[in-house]
Image (cartoon, rainbow, N blue to C red):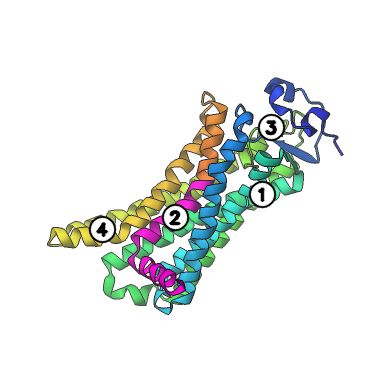
Amino acid sequence: MQETPFCLRVGHLHSFSMSNYNTTDFTNPSIFILLGIPGLEAAHVWISIPFCTMYAIAILGNFTILIIVKRDPSLHGPMYYFLCMLAITDLVLSTSVLPKMLAIFWFNSREIDFSACLTQLYFIHCFSGMESGIFVAMGFDRYVAICHPLRHSTILTNPVVAKMGLAVVLRSSMLVLPYPFLVRQWRYCRTNIIPEPFCAHISVVKLACGDTQVSSYYGLFVLLCVMGLDGIFIAMSYTQILRAIFSLPTKDARLKTFGTCVSHLCVTLIFYIPGLFSSLTYRFGQNVPLHFHVLIGNMNLLVPPMINPIIYGVRTKQIRDRLLRFITHKG
């Protein structure tokens, strides 16, 4: 097993430059070192406060959505099933990142086993892909509800919803499955230092020796297949939705109908815009400051799981009413 240098074990990582890290001489380490947020090590404890708050809100909000939908039979419909899928995905996604991140910030626990790193890598990318697919399914639900309202219950039956959910899970699981196998086959002879608080695919690939274009190109292929195609499908859905809305006779009817899409549109934009920016800066943003890039990557994984239940809780009348009724009943 590669021994971690004493300076890394006691936590004085900030006293070493990246050039020092890159001269480490070893081959295929059994552990990686997660730096957290390079350049902001002194502020890690303060940075952990909003991160921990976001995680707590994400856990509380998403579990609340699941409990409300489960307890109320009137919410057992396609929109709320997709919302439960989104809540479960957000819980897994945030939990795959935050505990280790907080361990780095609070206890300086920077080491992560190679296999654990690959597991975290898989969960991050797999459930990010699932979240993207769920947004497509929710967009299709809004399209059918607005453009074909009389056929909504016959088109989106429970078996159809289950098949859509299964397709989302299988697509993301299979597309991301080659990631850890490709990463495992490379030799690592430069450094085992990852300048982030979690293991992302492209961050690990950049540490490998030799020609890693297969991993890089496959990562770009997955990005285009998931976020690219899903973005196109969502745009197509909203093109048809807007056409249907603008064909309504009165302004009040148009605003009321569009209001049913606002929640989905907001959470979709919150997910895709930072995610696309983060993915592109990984590959092409050589001039972007490292700490800024890392913070954007963190926000991309932490903000949507926190914001999604808040937006749906505030904007969806049925959930808001059930939540108030639940709180009042408990009180």
Amino acid type, mark 2: Asn
* Quadrant hosting residue 1: top right
What secondary structure characterizes most of the magenta part? helix
Is the residue 159 above or below the residue 317 in the image?
below
Helix, strand, or loop for circle 2? helix
Percent from the top left, x then y, of residue 150? 27, 75
- Residue drawn at x 72%, y 30% is 210
Q: Which residue is mark 2?
A: 308
Magenta residues, as a range?
302-331
The secondary element bearing badge 3 is classed as: loop
Residue holding disc 3: 211
* Residue at left offset 85%, top offset 34%: 3
In the picture, measured across the screen, residue 237 lies left or right of residue 117, that is: left
Q: Is residue 200 visible?
A: yes
Q: CA distance from mark 1 to mark 2?
A: 22 Å
Q: Name the residue rendered at 28%, 71% in the picture.
A: 149
Residue 125: where, in percent of width, then height?
58, 49
Q: Earlier in the sequence, mark 4 or mark 3?
A: 3
